[in-house]
């Protein structure tokens, strides 16, 4: 537990790098799948001295193998969204308290104490999507909120419309977090006239609508909700941390999470700010599975450390939170 608390207290690049190398060696020892992958790359663990030398496990492994450290029974198994017949990723989480600690501290960093927030969700309920890490996070945040009027409204747009128009206690923020296609549907049916609200979208339109550019999406949602910016959440089943964007599609990570951009033609080469490539993620909260994941997302870094998500590899399966609803 002391090691986990130290992770959330990371305050410098040097501390992050040292902790990441420690986690890398522990996961090599304890995670059979990751160890096989590292050995197949013929990498001598003792010679790895920086995070850029750490092998990143392709995210596809979560579809075919149990990526977990040791033999501890999982407290939860989160599954990625998918259409019928699609192979879904499985993330075996052996410590739900660690996941809660990560997303609560991350949320506080960007939005303040969830106790002071009213949460409204355009997602399935926990009963409808019991294996969704996103829905689990939202429900847990609602449980920490002091608002008596939190709720899930995917099947009740008129109820959400009424809730958004209600007066709120002084000092209370209202966060509306939803699947992108659901936010668009609501915006088309119930536009405008709301009290201040933070609108957070969680993904694209895979399997629901044709894809549209972020600029077009925000040009529709901003006037419909009467806001200047649409916020975004970047997370996935295979992670225990999230990045957040408070506008313009530029994401920031908490101190225990880091983004690297790899060359799409050379997975061992990394790209500097402003150059588009594939996203590698270090999520140190993923201590019991794998903290070093090579995703199928495309993006680029900015000089200030923020990053953008630009799309996905053409050959990648359609995935995303919007596939949770049939």
Image: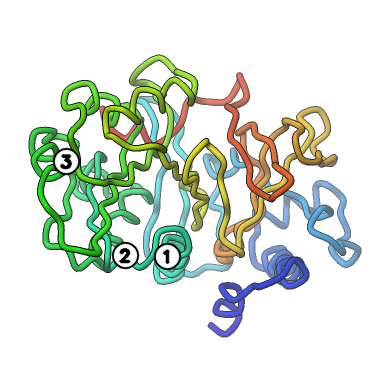
Name the quadrant containing residue 46: bottom right
143 displayed left or right of 300: left
Q: Determine crowd level at label 2: few under 14, some 14-19, many 20+ residues with C-alpha closer than 10 A.
A: many
**Picture layout, residue 38 above or below residue 275:** below
Q: Nearer the viewer, mark 2 or mark 3?
A: 2
Q: CA distance from mark 1 to mark 3?
A: 24 Å
Residue 37 % position (x, y): 73, 49
Q: Are discs 1 and 2 less than 8 Å apart at CB? A: yes
Give the labeled residue for mark 1: 108
**Picture layout, residue 271 above or below residue 255:** above
Residue 61 % position (x, y): 60, 43
Q: Are discs 1 and 3 less than 8 Å apart at CB? A: no
Q: Residue at x 58, y 27 (%)?
A: 311
Q: Residue at x 42, y 65 (%)?
A: 108
Report the residue that reaches farthest toward the bottom: 2
236 displayed left or right of 113: right
């Amino acid at each position: 537990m002391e090691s986990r608390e130290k992770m959330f207290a990371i305050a410098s690049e040097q501390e992050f790098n040292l902790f990441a190398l420690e986690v890398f060696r522990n996961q090599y020892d304890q995670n059979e799948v990751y160890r096989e992958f590292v050995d197949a790359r013929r990498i001598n663990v003792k010679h790895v001295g920086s995070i850029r030398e750490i092998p990143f496990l392709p995210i596809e492994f979560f579809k075919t193998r149990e990526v977990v450290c040791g033999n501890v029974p999982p407290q939860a198994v989160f599954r990625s969204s998918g259409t019928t017949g699609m192979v879904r990723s499985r993330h075996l989480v052996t410590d739900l308290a660690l996941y809660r600690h990560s997303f609560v501290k991350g949320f506080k960093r960007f939005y303040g104490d969830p106790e002071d927030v009213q949460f409204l969700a355009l997602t399935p309920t926990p009963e409808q999507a019991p294996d969704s890490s996103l829905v689990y996070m939202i429900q847990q945040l609602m449980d920490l909120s002091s608002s008596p009027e939190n709720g899930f409204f995917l099947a009740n747009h008129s109820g959400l419309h009424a809730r958004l128009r209600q007066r709120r206690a002084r000092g209370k923020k209202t966060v509306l977090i939803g699947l992108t296609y659901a936010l668009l549907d609501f915006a088309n049916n119930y536009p405008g006239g709301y009290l201040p609200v933070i609108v957070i979208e969680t993904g694209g339109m895979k399997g629901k609508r044709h894809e549209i550019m972020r600029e077009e999406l925000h040009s529709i949602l901003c006037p419909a909700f009467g806001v200047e910016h649409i916020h975004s959440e970047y997370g996935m089943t295979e992670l225990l941390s999230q990045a957040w964007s408070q506008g313009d599609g530029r994401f920031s990570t908490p101190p225990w999470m880091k983004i690297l951009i790899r060359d799409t033609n050379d997975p061992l080469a990394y790209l500097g700010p402003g150059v588009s490539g594939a996203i590698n993620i270090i999520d140190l909260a993923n201590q019991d599975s794998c903290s070093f994941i090579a995703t199928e997302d495309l993006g680029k870094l900015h000089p200030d450390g923020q990053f953008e998500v630009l799309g996905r590899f053409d050959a990648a399966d359609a995935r995303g939170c919007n596939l949770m609803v049939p």
